[in-house]
Image: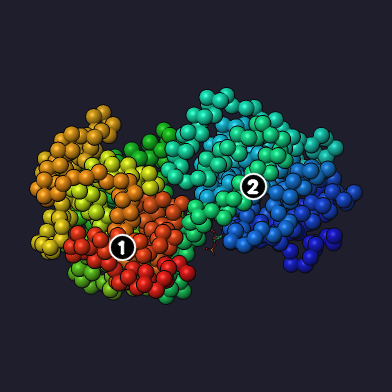
Amino acid sequence: MSDTASPHEGSPVRLIPNTPVALIEIDNPPVNATSRHVRSGLLAAIQEVGRNPQIGAAVIACAGRTFVAGADIREFGRPPQEPHLPDVINAIEACSKPVVAAVHGTALGGGCEIALACHARVAEPGAGFGLPEVKLGLVPGAGGTQRLPRLVGLEAALDLVTSGRTVKAAEALRLGLIDQLSTADLRQDAMDLARDLIGRPLRRTGECAVTPLDAATASAKVADIHRKARGAQAPGRAAELVLLSASLPLQDGMTRERETFLELRSSAQSAALRHAFFAEREVTRLPGIDSVEPRPVQKIGIVGAGTMGSGIAIAFADAGFDVKVVEASEQALAAGQARITDVYDKQVQSGRITAAARDERLQAIEYEVGISSLSDRDLVIEAVFEDLDVKRALFRDLDEILPPGTILATNTSYLDINLIAAVTSRPADVVGLHFFSPANVMKLLEIVRTDRTAADVVATGLSLAKRLRKIPVVCRVCDGFVGNRILSRYRLQAEYLLEEGALPHEVDAALEAFGFPMGPFAVSDLAGLDIAWARRKRLAPTRDPRERYVDIADRLCEAGRFGRKTGAGWYRYDGGKREVDPFVTELVEEASRRRGLTRRSISADEIQSRIRAAIVNEACKILDERIVERPLDVDVVMMHGYGYPAWRGGPLFEADSVGLRPILDTVNERAERDGPGWEPADGLVSRAASGATFYP
Ligand code: T1G
């Protein structure tokens, strides 16, 4: 092999045969995924290292921003092509000469598996390692479940493989996953280590022994893994394979692993999770906005330091923005500052950030009384009381003091932003940035464009989302935008189920079995019943009297039962534990009597079908009204803002496999029973009739 060419010109893998330590460099942008050409180039390079007597050892490194971030997910829809990654990785481990991995960025999936098969691993301090295959509905398919336990032990391997989480280099070192941290020149440090290993016995990971877990510990861990998986199958299957590593020789374990990988690769859950992976990236690319330059934003003003305002301030400070929080009074400002400081203190206590990082973030946040100090801001977002008149008055005042070009954003969760923008002299600069609580944690950000929002303001929202590490969905104005509008519909359907015979904990249990982290009544107790109550009272004058209305939640609120924060809501919370409350059961049964309904037992299947139908139908109305442009916009909102199980791919992706005809039948049945607002969406009727799907 010539000194810079690879087996064939244009290969993404170069072998530079320095002596005694050769360099194998992978260069396959954007993330050095192990496409077929990478696999064949890597295999050829390793074979050459073994053959060439001038070469005593080799380092595998990557060009660009990261070490290998895994197999090429786009290849999974096609039959696997040789050379298969396990074979390439086995060749690395079997090499007669030392091979050292030099890791920067993230070694994920197949990338981590390549590193595990090397005879040693050196990483930059900021590097990460992970086997996130379960997040794609897969298990590692190239030795990860068998080699990782051989380096870090069964318990750590079970945690990493079944959670799919990434560990930073320092933790990787502590676990034994890597051998050395590089604080200077990564490649040089790796080559020095490779040179030191020449002539010494090689530690082949596959030959290391695994200490088995006792049966009780193993079964307890597997049970916990299944519980956390909430219906996803990959974590449990991965756990079985990891545990096998203690009883099977490497190749036998890898055979079982490969069989499982190939089985899951063709599973519906993996197809859904791969869809979700690409959808949350595709959603940031909006026709007509892609080529628009965002406005420069660095200085952020936040009006309102309540729960949302504080969370938004933290989100921006964490992303490196200069933040100024303002409130109407010293007292409210102090309360907000205390709230923000408390969040950071808790992160230091939990070890999530260092005290120095906390201090740095806190220093990036200024606090002022009144809005006059906001005149130097690039963007101002309000998170004040959820009342249209309050927000309009504030925007009038902001319009007076903010310089031209500053963006005025509102965090409202359902008010009409067109009406807010209309009071300003710059409606094109007004946009909704709807964060989800806690704003510094939840990934979803609804970017709400009004009838007059400028394209570069939308583009700025998308650019901010990327810096905030959030997942943006651009939508237009309607009551509740996308997520809250759909939530209010399926929450109403859930209340119909109560009148007809179910109890809150039965509805919640059915939806948690469906894969939601929490059912709608438990979520309502967490968020507070008073928020939805205020909305219902606001909408009461315009509510269609023909629509079936359930007043159980109103009666809970009238009794002061606003959820966890008052110790009782749909459930009772003695000592924080959620318990079924006979008071609520009686309230529900009384509601049935008032409705003249004979209560009946309702199956989990019926609960799930009716909730799914409510979600899909409202989603179709949202598409019909062009509130969003694409089905993936709805799926991303529901997965990242409302806990719709990602292993179902989101409601519309899943509807394609469930079938639109049965969903439409359920919608039609409910329309007869529940009146206006429940009629089938045009888009649902037309697709069911034509056999069209949401995703071709
Ligand atoms: N395959 C194909 N494309 C990928 C990819 C992958 N593995 N990872 C990223 N991309 C694309 C992504 O779609 C986007 O494309 C661009 O790269 C930048 O990504 C055998 C079977 C590495 C942490 O699950 O977690 O190995 O939108 O926007 O925010 O056992 O990408 O620009 O056209 O996310 O800096 C296991 C998945 C695979 C890692 C970088 N590996 N990737 O994040 O950039 S299965 C993974 C990530 C496997 C083995 C098994 C992230 C990242 P576009 P990005 P980022």
Q: In whole angstroms, how far apart are the C-alphas of marks 2 and 1? A: 39 Å
For label 1, the residue is 665
Q: What residue is rendered at 11% in x and 45% in y?
A: 593
Q: What residue is rendered at 64% in x and 47% in y?
A: 259
Q: For this view, does 401 lie left or right of residue 80?
A: left
Report the disc number at residue 149.
none
CB at disc 2 and ligand 1 closer than 8 Å: no
Amino acid type indicated by mark 2:
Glu
Report the disc number at residue 259.
2
Rendered position, 327 above or below 13: above
Q: Position of residue 413 (x, y in %)?
A: 26, 57
Q: What residue is rendered at 49% in x and 29% in y?
A: 220
Name the one closer to the observer, 490 or 366: 490
Whether residue 120 can be seen here:
no
Circle 2 or circle 1, nearest the eye: 1
Amino acid type indicated by mark 1:
Asp
Decide: few, some or many residues near mark 1? Use Cα within 10 Å; few <14, some 14-19, many ≥20. Answer: some
Q: Position of residue 334 (x, y in %)?
A: 25, 42
Q: Position of residue 528 (x, y in %)?
A: 22, 45
What element does badge 1 sit on? helix
- Outermost residue to the right: 53
Q: What residue is rendered at 30% in x and 72% in y?
A: 682
